[in-house]
Amino acid sequence: MKIRILFFLNLAVTVCLAQIGVSIIPQPVIMKVNSGNFIIDAHTAIQFNSNQKELKSAADFLTTNVKNISGYSLQINVAKQKVIQLMIVEMPQIGDEGYQMDVTTTSVTIKANTKSGIIYGIQSLLQTLPAICTNVTLQVPCMNITDYPRFKYRGMHIDESRHFFGPDVVKEYINLMASYKMNTFHWHLVDDQGWRIEIKKYPKLTSVGAWRVDHNDKVWGSRPQAKPGEEATYGGYYSQEQIKEIIKYAAERNITIIPEIEMPGHVASAIASYPALSCTQKPQLPLTGGNYTDMSSNYCAGNDSVFTFLEKVLTEVIELFPSKYIHIGGDEVDKGPWKVCPKCQAKIKTDHLVNEEGLQSYFIKRIEKFMKSKNRKIIGWDEILEGGLAPEATVMSWRGEAGGIEAAKAQHDVIMTPGSPVYFDHYQAGPEGEPLAIGGMNTLKKVYDYEPIPKELNAIEAKYILGAQANLWTEYVTTAEHVEYMVLPRMLALAEVLWTQKENKSWENFNERLQSHFKAFGQKGLHFSSGNFTVSIKPTSQNAKLFVNLSTEIMNAQIYYTTDGTEPTLSSNKYTDPIEINLSLLLKASTVVNGRIMGAQAARQNFVLHKAIGKTVTYTNPVSKYYPADGPNSLTDGVKGTDAVGKHWHGFSGNDLIANIDLGEEKNIQSIGLGCLQNYNDWIFLPQSVLFESSIDGIIFTEIKTIPNTLDIKQKKAMFEFKADFPILSARYVRVSAKNNLCPVGHSGAGKPGWIFVDEIVVE
Ligand code: TNX
């Protein structure tokens, strides 16, 4: 029996001391690890000068964490052999959030200008300890750290409207953020599918607007609407008391909470509660998911009582949240209802506004004026640039970086949250084998490589970029476990983007440090993604021949592949150099680490051989930089687009596709096809028609055929190949022209240019 106990103790010691090296994330500015350790045990105490009262909560924070790890209760301000000293001292060179930590065998000293810095020092200290390790002494390696952040805004967002998680999950989220020195929590409390904050003056916002008929078992976009009489059982909201408690919890961890009270769109929940707020004033039931048919989702912008309502709501919000910023949304306003609303139209006339964009700008400016009177500043999504930016607004750039660049050039503060790569509702691997996500692919490496300051800005403009933020929209994320999985470990990569000095970043070194964080997640029972094991299959053309490059993000991994449709094993081909594709085939590839095939499924790609494979395509109008697919020759790489918007497709916005292909020599051809995608909600439409032409000399082209579009422009999703079959002819050059569409009447972009998405010109 005794032996068994000893055995277990031994094991525990081995596990606890296995924390080899120091693996702090984000990487500090200067760190020197020395020999020896500081031991935390019953002879250790925390000390601080009792005149620095604000340090009491920092000391408590450390005590609680050490107790959770080892079971020791560190005493505060009592005489002991070994001390952890917390000190606020003037150190101008490290700024408000910086800290300095010196660990020797007899003391740990954490110094900073503010309590925030002290807390960050404590977080670094905690990262040197095991996650859980009861009944043994804890060792902190001797070291010297000087540390401070690169950006002052380091944000994480969560959408609690689409799914409601409740106080425990939110606190855990805040705690995780704090461990990685993120400092701003953007709390999305209002959206179409649920109003989540108690407003005393308007109780129906939560008694009605926080509850919906439960269709959570169905995918977001295919949920039926609520029917009259059905019971609304899914939802919830935060009482003002709960909010106060969460704000305090966050503040103890250096986290500011910015609430988002969305307006003037995305507010079907408010309208379900108080129908008089919309243009039509028609009653409606809370939305169950993504079906907006006959729903009002905007406030009426021409009705003064809407502003009275909002001012009262915002007054209560301001009383609760001490944050300098309040987020007022502003995204994706469907201007359709304003176009046909007499009150909105009258407002446009009397205030000499240019159009509905002007009306949106008027709305936001009016709210900004009110917020300014209360000494607060507004943040809005980048749509608030439309029709003119409110004078002091801060812009959150989510539709790429263009909005952020425009705002910074106009001397407005900016927070970068571009969908690619910091939307954490997008896939991080797979998508095969991953939980269903909204689309897109933001892998850990993509997040790590993100640079928040766009090249387009000069040094002065760059100062307006306050930092960046990851957004976790939750249409597809319904549980705490899933929340953890989507942010871990991507949040750690973002933390390093935002805190660590650019020159200290290293993907290899980050991966090494990540291993001990994975171990800690495991010990704490947190759900996380262990990496993007999906092999990237990238076609390229060289000398008019088609090759594929295979690569993996995983460090120290190999790739094994097959071309006969079988699953790769360790006896399949090992990838070394680009593979030439000279017949139609199905390629499958897997990542192998330490002799094990990793990932849920092998990556796979079908290649279809035809006469234009590997040939160079030149465009008369440029392809959008946002949809480059796999590079210039994606239309002749033997890979056909799938229904995933981002992959394989070349996008053209507002102009026609005119593609010229040089077949290299005269060839006999008898058919040409062009694959196209329609995705109505994403403003992507099949072209009006496609013209196919051929030429011998590349100068004079002869029409072969024009194929008109026959699909209904309102069809939500479709893939279609425009194909011309014809008697054999000889041609060296082929030209394919596809005519762009405007968004149709009834579409949220009605009258504006749409996109065409094309992939693979198949010449046979
Ligand atoms: C766009 S980002 C939205 C959200 C959705 C999200 C899904 C933004 C300001 N608006 O309402 O949840 O896409 O990725």
Image: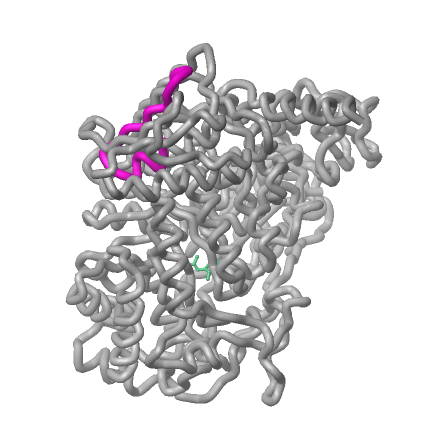
Work out whether 168 lies above or below 240: above
The extreme left residue here reads 373
Residue beneath the point at 70% across and 48% down? 671
Percent position of residue 332, x then y: 40, 65
For the record, the magenta segment spans 104-121
Q: Can residue 706 be seen in this view?
A: no
Residue beneath the point at 37% across and 87% down? 276
Work out whether 252 lies above or below 129: below
For the N terminus, the quadrant is: top right
Percent position of residue 37, x then y: 47, 16
Q: State yes or no: residue 118 in magenta.
A: yes
Work out whether 102 lies above or below 566: above
Residue beneath the point at 25% across and 42% down? 53
* Residue 456 in the figure: left or right of residue 679: left
Residue 455: quarter of image? top left
Residue beneath the point at 78% across and 35% down? 585
Of 391 and 168, nearer the camera is 168
Q: Can residue 268 be seen in this view?
A: yes
Percent position of residue 257, x then y: 35, 54
The extreme top residue here reads 35
Work out whether 16 lies above or below 491: above
Of 636 and 48, nearer the camera is 48
Percent position of residue 147, x then y: 32, 27
* Residue 266 in the figure: left or right of residue 118: right
In this figure, which colouring scheme has been used for the structure? Answer: one colour
Q: State yes or no: residue 106 in magenta.
A: yes
* Count of picture labels: 0
For the C terminus, the quadrant is: top right
